[in-house]
Image (cartoon, coloured by chain):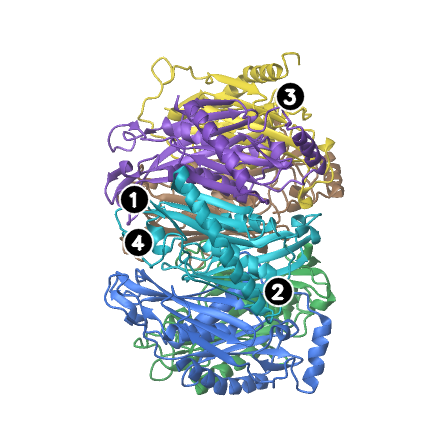
Chain colours: A green, B yellow, C cyan, D blue, E brown, F purple
Amino acid sequence: MGGYSDVQMIDENGIRVDGRTAGEIRPVSINAGIIPVADGSAEVIWGTNHVIAAVYGPMEAHPRKIQKQDRAVLDVRYNMAPFSTTDRIRPGFNRRSREISKVTAEALESVVLTELYPRSKIRVEIEVITAEAGTRCAGITAASVALADAGIPMTDMVISVASGKINGVVVCDLNKEEDNYGEADLPMGVCANSGELVFLQMDGDLSPEEFQIAWDYNMEAIAPVHEMMIDALKRSNGGDE
Amino acid sequence: MGGYSDVQMIDENGIRVDGRTAGEIRPVSINAGIIPVADGSAEVIWGTNHVIAAVYGPMEAHPRKIQKQDRAVLDVRYNMAPFSTTDRIRPGFNRRSREISKVTAEALESVVLTELYPRSKIRVEIEVITAEAGTRCAGITAASVALADAGIPMTDMVISVASGKINGVVVCDLNKEEDNYGEADLPMGVCANSGELVFLQMDGDLSPEEFQIAWDYNMEAIAPVHEMMIDALKRSNGGDE
Amino acid sequence: MGGYSDVQMIDENGIRVDGRTAGEIRPVSINAGIIPVADGSAEVIWGTNHVIAAVYGPMEAHPRKIQKQDRAVLDVRYNMAPFSTTDRIRPGFNRRSREISKVTAEALESVVLTELYPRSKIRVEIEVITAEAGTRCAGITAASVALADAGIPMTDMVISVASGKINGVVVCDLNKEEDNYGEADLPMGVCANSGELVFLQMDGDLSPEEFQIAWDYNMEAIAPVHEMMIDALKRSNGGDE
Amino acid sequence: MATPPVPELLKTHLTKLAESDERLDGRGRFEGRDVIVETGVLARAEGSARVQMGDTIVLAGVKFQIMTPYPDRPTSGGFMTSAEVRPVCGVHWEAGPPSPEAIELGRVVDRGIRESGCIDMEDLCILPGEKAWQVILDVFALSDDGNLFDAFATAAMAALRTAIIPGERFDVGEDRPLPVSKTPMMCSYHRVGGRFVYDALRREEIGGGERIHITLGDDNHVHSLQKGLKGAFTAAEFDEIMEHARSRCAELRDLVNN
Amino acid sequence: MATPPVPELLKTHLTKLAESDERLDGRGRFEGRDVIVETGVLARAEGSARVQMGDTIVLAGVKFQIMTPYPDRPTSGGFMTSAEVRPVCGVHWEAGPPSPEAIELGRVVDRGIRESGCIDMEDLCILPGEKAWQVILDVFALSDDGNLFDAFATAAMAALRTAIIPGERFDVGEDRPLPVSKTPMMCSYHRVGGRFVYDALRREEIGGGERIHITLGDDNHVHSLQKGLKGAFTAAEFDEIMEHARSRCAELRDLVNN
Amino acid sequence: MATPPVPELLKTHLTKLAESDERLDGRGRFEGRDVIVETGVLARAEGSARVQMGDTIVLAGVKFQIMTPYPDRPTSGGFMTSAEVRPVCGVHWEAGPPSPEAIELGRVVDRGIRESGCIDMEDLCILPGEKAWQVILDVFALSDDGNLFDAFATAAMAALRTAIIPGERFDVGEDRPLPVSKTPMMCSYHRVGGRFVYDALRREEIGGGERIHITLGDDNHVHSLQKGLKGAFTAAEFDEIMEHARSRCAELRDLVNN
């Protein structure tokens, strides 16, 4: 979190640099089935973020030592393409991407019916093509759509959104410019139907009251994004799903 | 390719810095059986290049996942010794040596009767002891002799030679000094008997006409080198092969 | 070996910077059973050195390719914690720690009855918490106690001590300050009962006569340390072993 | 860490215990093990602590290096946390490059401290744009019987609060205490037998589900959250945990500050 | 990429098709798939392109860095190509360090561009001996249904030809287009069912033999050749391929230049 | 090197031979193979040697680089030894990162030379605190039929004693011989069939036990010792070996110095 609070990012009317109100998310568009050779795929364009997810499987898990006797393993990789940020990213895994891959896998495992596919593996590849704050949330959302597009049975769909704080004000879905001066970040992954959480991180500084506001903003954003996900899947399946 | 064409590398009579004519290769000598503990081995001294190849196997391929059910795999490593060049080379594989290992393996697989040894592995180790332009060609040639020395059945022997261009003139087998100012490099691997190609790379700039001349120079160099290979194998086997 | 012999490290009475005589070792204390979750453990505090060893196993050796049909393998790791030295050590193995792990494993294999546990593995973890010259010796000694604490059958116990040379004088058990100016280092690992050697290294410069003195100092230090090891095991087992 | 095969028997046993609101070692759901904090335990570290919670034992050591400040923060020092959970601390931890669990451990401990702002990074500046102190926090597990997260976080704060900046050794002024203005503390909860418990044992971790890590500052501000492992939880469950964390973090803070 | 087990049935089927000079998707031997080139598709790259050939989709992005020129070329900038073919693009591509195939892909694409001299390296000099632009070309596969080589090479040239040197962001002068004076293009041929075909599908690659990649410049000069995989070919076969490459490269060049 | 399965038959055979004090190739216990030393064998190295002992063949090459002296030794040059035993030299050596055996080989050869003080590090200084020569010794095995340690150590000294510091190429003065004032030599002993033998064959190594490496200087000073592999030996056994090493090192030294 940057925290240079002397830069004014919200005007006297509570309007943010890109014209949004405090609780408003960026424009979102979602498309499914965008990678022809994948078993399922999706792209999430969330503000300037462009994130792609592909799903392969279920397939035999090999080497055998990664197999689970009673369920499928979710092999999730989150990666930022070298050209996704202003400063080029050198290829190769790093600790940040490993941690994001891990928490994403754990979030998705909470809804995928992995016990239907013992000893098998489901590959979930998340690629950030263009990054603009909030890529891990967009990645989880994209992966959720790609899994559905692949026909993988799930108990629920996961939508992920983050709220934050800037100039001491809690706002939903920080963009890159806001994030540079942000004072907190609370990304959550919520099940569309049950309302349960399968993903939660946070860093920065939030008072108990601020925390509640940020939490509520995230919860309010779930339903509209869920609509777009369903719509994307319908379009991908010829509109008759 | 360097391409500083203002340095004069060929005189008015078409004679090169080391006294060769355009189509002439450097002095070559080949010896087989030079590594006592190997199943087959050879050294190629080509100009100042000194390249050694050792063959081990066929042996059981392990780990099992590298086994092929219907043939032997050729496990080829091309490596430059740390003291092989003016500036010391740090040990360890790099992208260049990986690529050369790959194309060398593919060239040799095209002539070795790998289907005689299912599930097995033949190790081919190519070590450049002293380098002076053209080491990949010398390595393929040395490996060819070492495989024959190991008694591995082959349909043909591969000879590899490169032609290039300097001062706008196509010449055969650039030495190090010429290579520094070279404008193109066309290495080819040719089967001695069939005349077919199993290895081909090229970079630089060659007009269609220049390309044909370079191609022809390489083809003309095959037979004399093949003679030396056969002679080396005869000497190694007591002169009665 | 440093070898700046113009710094005076021994006074006219043969007394060293920390008040010891030439053949005297630093104060030593040993405790067993200090890691609750390990099968066996020990700490050796040797001067300012603080070295911990934990033993896990015997357990099934995996992957299977490391199994020995006729005996257990000793999987020994020597590591220096990042905060163990004045300049922080970056985590990760290096050539020094690999070599020490290897010679330590070979020393311990010479006394552990590995043939009682075919196809299995005994893990020995040596961690240097605070380093002050002589950590490899302290590690071997600690591992010896930890193996006994784990109830692993052994033919003998190994005690390791090093002598060295400073200002041209042979002395036993160099401390850090002496080591910085030391002219030789002769670490040995000796079996308490048989008097045989299972570990030996040396570097520096010792005349044949100096070598003999250093050797003898090491041999004389074995018995008292052995007493402390036995005492530590007794205390760890309620004083009735 | 290779994921251990989940023993179904253990899981069943933990569920049984949970039905009568019991735990393996007799503790209540939100009861922690005794915590023993010792500082100044590492002769070569500029700040150090040893924390024992039952059979879980960890060390934390603080070292300093001189760094060139990042161009965009010319008057700021640096802070990094490294958690290499080595195989010495338990049979289930294996050698090799840091496992995803060890990476997560280090990053979650780091974030709680960093985001609380308890270390004044500007105070670490030696010469603007040229020299600043980098604080390196190494947490090290000696014995893992569960809940390394809280043990690490507690040892880390105890080590930082007693650390001395070694100005003299680096020839840049006098030695002085590292300025640490707050004491963020972490509380971790695991789903065991269906409900969340505080300060899980290793066997509860093995037979349990998801876990939640909460780092709170002096004033109950939230500085870091992390949900780990497969599992879904409700907002009500989270509220209950958060309420406990507020009181427990205060207790742990007292332990570290005294 | 782990070599997939060659399905003998596929091989037999391809041989059958070849006998009547047919292909899996009805194309002629030397007929390419439709090529769609879009530029300016990556918001964070200084030059970018997306190329689709059937179900093969790739991206190329150009980024710039400031480098210190090599001592022996004080007035030259730099150019590097990186092809990390990630597992997103197909079930047969696996995670991990770059496979030999990915290394070869990057190196062959790089050579064709570099050796053509289409980028004036001297023009990238900012301050002789001190500062120069390094052009970094990243090619990225989204969907691999065969012939990544040509898709990458085409996307690369389209991205380079639209790249803007970001002088202002780096505070070294004004933004200006990257000077690209030529348009080298690559055509790739695979032995399928005994004879060479152009622009192979993934299934033709799996069931096929050796492959030959040819990069030709504006004037039909040869800039790069590469033979890959096990197999032997005749001079006559090569001549036939080269003749086709001359006309097809010209077509592709028109597509990229417009 | 993957440890080869110890053939019990070989072990039994070696024990049998030992009972009548014989060896596989008819040599006596402390009899070495003929040693052939050639220098100047590598066209690109500043010093080089080839050593053959029976079917064991190795190369050593000396290269020079310019380094910045370490801050605590501003007038000292550097010396490093690298032994990458590549799979070319024997079926039992495998590709990949250096094995523990290769690391030990390099470190033991390095220590013997370094600790003897035979290279005057101060003489390698070019400009105090700024520039000094780094001597890089690469030892390379062509054919391993046992006792690479002694072959490497012998080749190393022969290469160093003939090395020329390439001042002219680096533009820092004239070319001149590397000053090497002593000739430390190594002798290695393996326990085979119960007793120690000198200069073991590969098959004796495979069927043998622990090994001891001794490096002695011109005046019989000990510069380096190393015991390797599982096994225990007595002080009396060591004394016997040391006595032989004193005479044999002198013989090898003559070979290298002439």
Q: Chain of mark 4?
A: E
According to the picture, the residue beneath numbered tag 2 turns out to be: C39
- Tag 3, which secondary structure? loop
- Mark 4–mark 2 CB contact (< 8 Å): no
| Amino acid of disc 4 | Gly
According to the picture, the residue beneath numbered tag 1 turns out to be: F68
Distance in Å between CA atoms under marks 4 and 2: 63 Å
Same chain check for tags 1 and 3: no
Q: Which mark is residue D248?
A: none
Question: Of circles 3 and 2, which is in front?
Answer: 2
Where is residue E33 shown, x and y percent of the image? Answer: 60, 45
User: Residue at 66% of width from left, 85% of height from top?
Assistant: D22
Distance in Å between CA atoms under marks 3 and 2: 68 Å
- Mark 4–mark 1 CB contact (< 8 Å): no
According to the picture, the residue beneath numbered tag 3 turns out to be: B194
Q: Chain of mark 2?
A: C
- Tag 2, which secondary structure? loop
- Tag 1, which secondary structure? loop
